[in-house]
Amino acid sequence: MIRILKYVAIDILKNKIVIAYTIMLALFSWSAFSLEDNSSKGLLTVLNIVLLTVPLVSVLFSTIYVYNSNEFIELLVSHPVKRSMIWKALFIGLSLSLVTAYVIGVGIPLLIFADWATGLIMILSGALLSVIFVAIAFLSCIVTRDKAKGIGVSIMLWLYFALLFDGLVLFLFFQFADYPIEKVVVFLSALSPIDLCRILILLRLDVSAMMGYTGAIFKNFFGNNIGLVFSFSLLALWIIVPFFFSLRKFKKKDL
Amino acid sequence: MIEIKNITKQFGKLTALNGLSLTLNKGECIALIGPNGCGKTTLIKSILGMVLPDKGDIFFEGKNIKNDNEYRRHIGYMPQIGRYPENMTIGQVIDMIKGIRHAHEVLDNSLYEQFEIGNMLDKKMRTLSGGTTQKVSATLAFLFQPKVLILDEPTAGLDPIASEVLKTKILEAREKGCLVLITSHLLSELEDIVSQVIFMQEGNLVLHKDTEDLKVATGQDTIARSIVHLLKEGKL
C-alpha cells in the first residue's frame, strides 16, 4: 500500500491546489489574528472560516480527485494489487495532504496566538473535520458513476451539514422553546460533525457564557474530559462509517 | 490453466454472460470471437477480477480467484481502449507499474525497444494517439513475461509494421508455452496465430474448437471462411 500511496501523494502535490489551499488558510488565519485586538475574537473569526471552508474544500477536492482517479484505479486493478489497498491509499493520500494543509495553514498561527489547550483542540477538530469530509466524498463518489451527480451529492451534503442542519436545529429550538429540549439539542448536535466541532471550541471561549441555559447544559455534557473523549469518538465514527460503506461498495464495483 | 464454471453476469436487464463454462489450457492461443456486445470483454474482465460475476467461479491454476489478487502477477493484459492517468508521462506509467508489481522476473524489453518507447518517455498520456497508447499497453502486457496473455483487440489502431511486430511477439509467447487469449473482429489477422476458436453469442458459448478440426469439419481452408460457412448454415 505504501507504494500506491507514494504515487497518490506525488500526484496530489503536483496538483498544486492543496498548496494554494494551504496558503489561503494561512492568509485567513494570520490576518484574522492580527486584525482583531484580542486573541479570543480572532479565534472566533478563524473558527467561522474553518467551519465553512475546510469541509467545502475537503469534500469537493476529494470528490473530483476520486472521479479523476478512475483511470488510475482501472490501471491498477489488472495488476496484483488488492482492491481495498487502492481505495485506502487514495483515502489516506487525500486525508494526509488536506490535514497537512490545515495544520500548516491554520495550526501554526493558532499555536502562536491562542492558548495551547484551545489551539490543540481546534487543530484536532479541524483535522478530523477534513478527514470526515474526505470520507463523505468517498461515499458520494461510490454511489453514482456519473461525475456531475457525484459532485452534486457532495455539494448537497456540505450545504446540509454546514448551513441547513444549523437552521433545522434552531427552528426546532424556537418551536419547542417552552419545553425542556436542551438534552435533545445536545443529542441532535452530535448528528452533525460541523456542529460538534463548533460546540467543542465555543465551550473553550468566553462567549459560551452568553449561550444561556443551553450553554450550561452543553458545558455540563461536552465540557468535561469524558465529554471531550465522547465527542472525539463521535467524530472518529463520522470518518469510519462513511469510509467503511464506500470501501465495501468499492470491493464489489465493476470496473 | 484457467477454468470458468457457470459464470453469470447481468448489467441491469442485460445478461452479459449466461452460465458460461470454459476450460483454457496452457500453450493454446485462443481466438475469442462473436458479434458486438456478446460478452467477450465482460468475460475477459471477469477473468481479471475487474468485473465480479453474479454467479459461478473462476479458477486460475486450480485456485479460486475470488478474494485473490496474486494470480494477476501471471497475467499480462492489454485492454481494448487503454485508459491511463492523463497527466502522467509514458515513463512514469511504466515506472509505476514496475514499482507496484515489485517484479522479480527478468523484464522483457523487446517490445519496448521495437516500438521505440524509449524515445517518447516524456510524452503525457493524454497527448498520445490511439495507436501509441496501444503500443504502451502492449509493452506493459509483455513486460513481465506472464504465463497468460489476455489481449483485447490488440491490433486495432496499430500501424501495419507495429501490428506485425506484435503478431511475431504473440507467436513467440505461444511457443514458450503461454496461454494467449485474443479477441478480434479481423479473423484474417488471427489466421496464422491461433490454435483454437471460441465463438460467443449473447453471453453463451456456442463453439469451442481446434482450428484444424474446424476447418476439416466445414471443409473450408481458412478460419474466416469456416465461421462464415457455419453462420450461413445456421449452425451458430
Image (tube, rainbow, N blue to C red):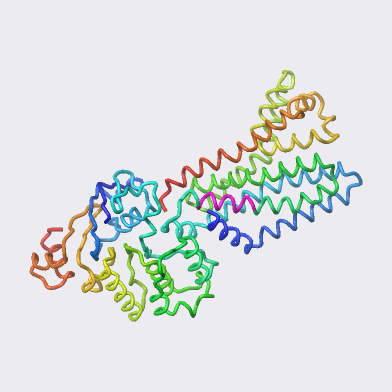
Looking at the image, is A175 positioned above or below residue B184? above
Looking at the image, is B53 positioned above or below residue B174? above
Q: Quadrant of residue A192?
A: top right
Q: Residue at x 74, y 53 (%)?
A: A104
Q: Nearer the viewer, residue B173 or A163?
A: B173
Which percent across, then down, holds residue A45?
81, 45
Which percent across, then down, holds residue B225?
15, 70
* Most common secondary structure along the magenta stretch: helix
Asked if the magenta segment contains residue A87, the reply would be yes
Q: Residue at x 70, y 54 (%)?
A: A101
Q: Nearer the viewer, residue A107 or A254?
A: A107
Q: Which residues are magenta?
A: A86-96
Quarter the C terminus of chain B occupies? bottom left
**Left or right for A16, reference A178:** left
**Left or right for B21, reference B234:** right
Asked if the magenta segment contains residue B148, the reply would be no
Q: Nearer the viewer, residue A62 or B210?
A: B210
**Left or right for A219, reference A232:** right
Quarter the N terminus of chain B occupies? bottom left
Which percent across, then down, holds residue A142?
50, 47
Q: Quadrant of residue A187?
A: top right
Which percent across, then down, holds residue B12?
36, 46
